Structures are given as C-alpha cells and as structure tokens.
Image: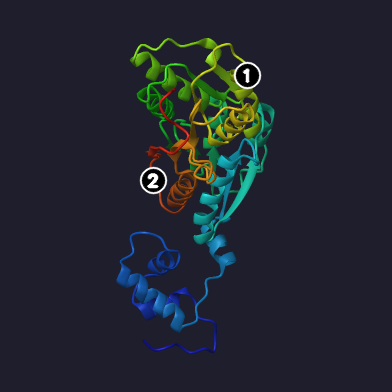
Amino acid sequence: MNALSNDRRNNIEDVAREARVSTATVSRALRGMPNVAPSTRERVRKAARLLEYRADPTASRLASGRTNTVAMVVPILDGWYFATVMAGAEGVLTDRGYELLVFVAGDEEARSRLIMSSRLRGADGMILVDVALTEAEAGTLLQLGGPIVSVGMEFGGFTSVVVDDVEIGRSATQHLVDLGHIDIAILGGAGDDPLGYLVPDRRREGYRQALDKVGIARRAELTIDGTFSVRSGYETMQELLALRHPPTAVFSMSDEMAFGALKAIRDSGLSVPGDISVVGVDDHPMSWVMDLTTVQQKVAGHGALAGRLVLDQIEESHEPLRQEAETSLIIRGSTAPPR
C-alpha cells in the first residue's frame, strides 16, 4: 500500500480505495460490526493506520442520524443487582463508542412521568431493567421507533433477557429438601409490589412446587415478605427465629437478604449450617467469602448481553427475540442436613 498525499486530511473514501473495499465496509470494519471477514477487517485497519485516518464522531452521528447514546431505566440505583447489570451493559456500549444514559423510575408516578417526557426520545435505543410497564406505557415506548431490550421482564415487541425465576426458587428449595429439611422458610420481596416486580411471585412459586412435589406441608408463618436488602434479611430472619417452631432451613430470594439472615442467626447464638441452613440467589461477589450456597445468575453477563442486543438492533435490523440466561446451583458451606 502507498500512503496518499498528506496535503489534505484523508477521509473514508481514501481508506476504501486503499483497502479496495466500499465505504460501507470501511465503516463496518472500523466500528467492529459483524459480517466483515477477518482478512478484510485487518486490511481496512491497516489502510486506516497508513493514512492516519480518524473517524469524525460528529460527522458520523450527523450522517447516521444517531446520537450514539443508549438509555437505561432502572427502579433503583443503589442495589447491587442493578449496578452490576448497568456495569455489564456500559462496558459493551463504551467499547462500541456509545454512551449509557441512566434514568431512575422509582415508583409508578416517576415511571409514567419519565415515559411521557422527552428525556428518552434522543437515545438510539433503550434497556429496561426490571421495569414493569402497563400496556399503554409499552405502546408509547414502541412508538419511539428505537430498539428496546428488557432485562428481567417480557413485553410484546421488545427483545428480552430473562432467567427462569420459577426454576430458581424450585432448585434452591429442592436442594434443601434433598438434604432432609422439612421446615423450610422463604424470605423475599412482597407479592403485592406496587411496581409490578414479578420476581418474588415467581421464585415463591418455585418454592411451593418443590415442597408440593414431595408432599411437605407449607406453613404460612414461614413465608416472610421483605425487601431485597441486607437489613431486610436481618429483620425478617429475626421474625422467623421468634417463632415457637423456627425453620431448620431458609431460602432467601437474594444473596443480600441471605447475608442479613446469616448475621441474625449468628447473633442469636445459633450456627450455620449446624442449626439452620441458608440458600441465596445471585452469587454476589461476597457469597464465597460468606461461604453461602446460592443459585448463580451471571448478572454482569445479563447487562453485557442486553448491551450487545440493543447495539445489534441499532446498527442492523433484527426482529425482537427472547434470550434466557442460564442459572446454576453453587453448593458451599451454608447448607447441610438438619440435626
């Protein structure tokens, strides 16, 4: 290859001529998009280096009509799960030259106000993380025309990244049943969540299925509602410990609640798993430190997958699809057969 004259700034057409490809192929190769042969991609990059070509992001955005931004809507900012999904998505978006704009819809009124405002309309695409929409709200977002990926919930017309929350509840409870436990409690979110958060109901259903399958009677007092936080796990576990017949095992719908439950058990002078076994969900980074048995879901991976899916739909037309992420039971030292 021979460098062109440096009397002017080289442009994408110059790179295309030097690499003997179209300008569209140059654009796709330099943005890391799929469907470009490795040899072609390397030839384009070599030509760009030789010609000292640097894409003008402003011109690129004007030409494409894009802002190179993706909006993410979350119910809260300070939860580990949401922060981790956000980090996973942001890593992918940043690598592809996009900026993540985060919006919080903490209650029904805030969600409705956000959807009806103009703040979401400038983004090229959108990621919703456990945001429950009414049918009308989903329709309003679809009218914006950009691709939408929903993490944790499913809506018609949206691409979704989900896990089987019923199976999560079933597998966690089944592990305790297999160990020989009968008095198994469940700690989780409220079933009448005003935000329409469906995870508690689905994980509770899995818990019920596991008990019903082997004929274990469900004790109503062993189902305790709370919030997905360490403090709530501590307080709800205290309620269970105050029962005349406390459980010998606990399924906590999140690792953070499980951390609180572990502290409450130990503060009461009991041991884990000697007196009470505990299972969580998530595989939080602190779970191995706490030696917590848990149902692992790769949360950062959910965010990364959502980021890739929304970018693929921004840069190429794709039909909405459903992606179910895998989960797996990780057995550690917080569970054992009952005494």
Local secondary structure at mark 2: loop
Amino acid type at image mark 1: Glu
Q: Is 19 in front, or is 275?
A: 275
**Crowding near the residue tagged with mark 1, few <14, some 14–19, many ≥20 C-alpha atoms within 10 Å:** some
Please tell me whether residue 197 is drawn above or below residue 288 in the rendered image: above
Looking at the image, which residue is at 55% across and 24% down?
187
Horizontal relation, residue 322 to residue 279: left or right = left
Residue with the mark numbered 2: 318
Q: Is residue 152 visible?
A: no
Quadrant of the snapshot with the N terminus: bottom left
Residue lying at 43% horizontally and 21% vertically, measured from the top left: 207
* Above-or-below relation of 56 to 300: below
All told, the count of numbered labels is: 2
Percent x, y of residue 291: 49, 41
Residue 239 is marked as 1
Tell me which corner region of the image, top left, top right, bottom left or bottom right, holds residue 179: top left
Q: Quadrant of the C terminus?
A: top left
Compare residues 50 and 207 and report the one nearer the observer: 207
Nearest to N terminus: mark 1 or mark 2: 1
Q: Is 37 placed left or right of 322 in the picture?
A: left
Local packing at callout 2 (Cα closer than 10 Å; few below 14, some 14-19, many 20+) is: few
Point 39% across, 45% down: residue = 318
- Residue 234 point in image, percent of width and height: 63, 29
30 sits left or right of 137 in the view = left
